């Protein structure tokens, strides 16, 4: 029983580390908050718990969001209480005004939630200028401690976490291609093809997480002195490459499913398709296997292209007797395998010459950059001033 219990925690080492660090950070925030500010421990612990994340980069952003939210929330709360006194109207208007201000400043989801939450903390019983100042100070303490402890929340660096994610999902993609290869060689059913397509769709769900982690690794390398910028850029490109690879794997799974619905693959091309899928699977495994050398990886991708070319020749030879739709599906798989090889070799212009979208705006602290907001506001003011000046002068 004790061994099973120990195994449960051992298999979740990362999670255990995170909750222990979060608990210790909350306790330290409580203690430091009470020592530096009278009755400031509760607010400091709440803010610390809300701000701490699995990385220093994310906690800095969350902590800044808490500070922005508290500053706005405290101002709105004090204004409403001074006009309407503490009560039903003051609380309701505070939440409404906070939402309006957060929207006007284009704050992201995180900060938009922080604004009304911190406002309600500030507007608690005994609200006054001094109380608001104390709670703002407690917020700063909680956010600062969260940032410090977040450094210890994960044993790996942002680049290391990105590499782990990419390696994990690439292994799953290679395994799925291997299963599809075996299934095609043995004569698969529509049900099997449906399971492959479902797994391929699940793999695509990891793309936003990989992209966010790659963006964090690159951003972390820009300002953290011990980070390697070149390594971070390389990992970022790898993240884009694995995203392109997963798209091709899902397309292959969809093509096999459509073929099964239409009556299956012709016996004359089963072997070539199976060989091509197996070669693509091995190419992915070789690319992300630490024990493989670069020369081996290059050969593996070349083998995948050659297998795809052999499949194309076989399909063209059977063009007169085979179903045209099946030939088109087979040639599409050839193109998918070529794209996988190009993505693994990182020699496709689609990887480096096309701008990849950053993380979605709703995940950022501010959906629109403060610089852009300031420039737009400045243009509006300048335009109005010029209009008035021309009208009267």
Image: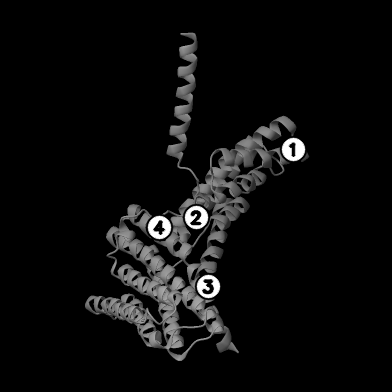
Quarter where residue 135 is shown: top right
Residue where numbered disc 3 is placed? 16
Q: Regarding mark 2 in the picture, which secondary structure is present there?
A: helix
Residue at (37%, 56%) from the top-left corner?
220
Q: Regarding mark 3 in the picture, which secondary structure is present there?
A: helix
**What percent of the width, then of the height, locates residue 180?**
45, 82
Mark 3 or mark 4, which is nearer to you? 4
Disc 3 and disc 4: Cα gap in Å?
25 Å
Say whether residue 131 is visible.
Answer: no
Disc 1 and disc 2: Cα gap in Å?
31 Å
Disc 1 and disc 3: Cα gap in Å?
42 Å
Numbered tag placed on residue 334 in the rendering: none
**What percent of the width, then of the height, locates residue 114?**
59, 48
Residue where numbered disc 1 is placed? 86
Numbered tag placed on residue 145 in the rendering: 2
Mark 4 or mark 2, which is nearer to you? 4
* Direction right: furthest residue: 88
Residue where numbered disc 4 is placed? 215
């Amino acid at each position: 029983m004790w061994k099973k219990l120990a195994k449960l925690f051992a298999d979740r080492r990362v999670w255990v580390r995170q909750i222990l660090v979060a608990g210790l950070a909350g306790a330290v925030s409580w203690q430091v908050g009470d020592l530096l500010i009278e009755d400031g421990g509760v607010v400091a612990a709440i803010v610390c718990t809300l701000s701490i994340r699995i990385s220093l980069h994310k906690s800095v952003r969350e902590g800044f969001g808490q500070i922005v939210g508290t500053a706005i929330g405290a101002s709105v709360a004090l204004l409403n209480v001074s006009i309407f006194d503490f009560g039903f109207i003051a609380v309701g208007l505070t939440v409404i005004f906070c939402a309006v201000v957060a929207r006007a400043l284009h704050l992201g989801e995180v900060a938009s939630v922080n604004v009304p939450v911190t406002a309600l903390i500030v507007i608690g019983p005994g609200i006054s200028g001094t109380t608001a100042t104390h709670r703002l100070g407690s917020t700063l303490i909680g956010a600062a401690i969260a940032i410090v402890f977040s450094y210890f929340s994960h044993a790996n660096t942002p680049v290391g976490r990105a590499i782990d994610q990419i390696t994990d999902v690439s292994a799953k993609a290679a395994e799925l291609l291997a299963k599809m290869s075996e299934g095609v060689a043995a004569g698969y059913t529509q049900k099997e093809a449906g399971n492959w397509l479902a797994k391929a769709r699940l793999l695509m769900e990891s793309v936003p997480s990989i992209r966010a982690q790659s963006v964090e690794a690159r951003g972390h390398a820009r300002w953290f002195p011990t980070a390697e910028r070149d390594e971070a850029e390389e990992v970022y490109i790898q993240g884009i490459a694995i995203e392109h690879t997963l798209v091709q794997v899902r397309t292959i799974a969809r093509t096999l499913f459509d073929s099964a619905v239409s009556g299956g693959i012709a016996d004359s091309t089963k072997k070539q398709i199976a060989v091509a899928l197996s070669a693509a699977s091995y190419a992915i495994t070789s690319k992300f296997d630490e024990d493989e050398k670069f020369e081996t990886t290059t050969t593996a991708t070349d083998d995948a292209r050659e297998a795809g070319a052999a499949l194309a020749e076989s399909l063209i030879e059977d063009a007169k007797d085979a179903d045209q739709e099946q030939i088109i599906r087979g040639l599409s798989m050839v193109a998918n395998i070529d794209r996988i090889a190009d993505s693994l070799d990182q020699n496709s212009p689609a990887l480096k010459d096309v701008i990849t979208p950053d993380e979605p705006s709703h995940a950022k602290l501010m959906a629109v950059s403060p610089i852009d907001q300031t420039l737009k506001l400045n243009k509006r003011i300048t335009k109005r001033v010029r209009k008035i000046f021309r009208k009267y002068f």
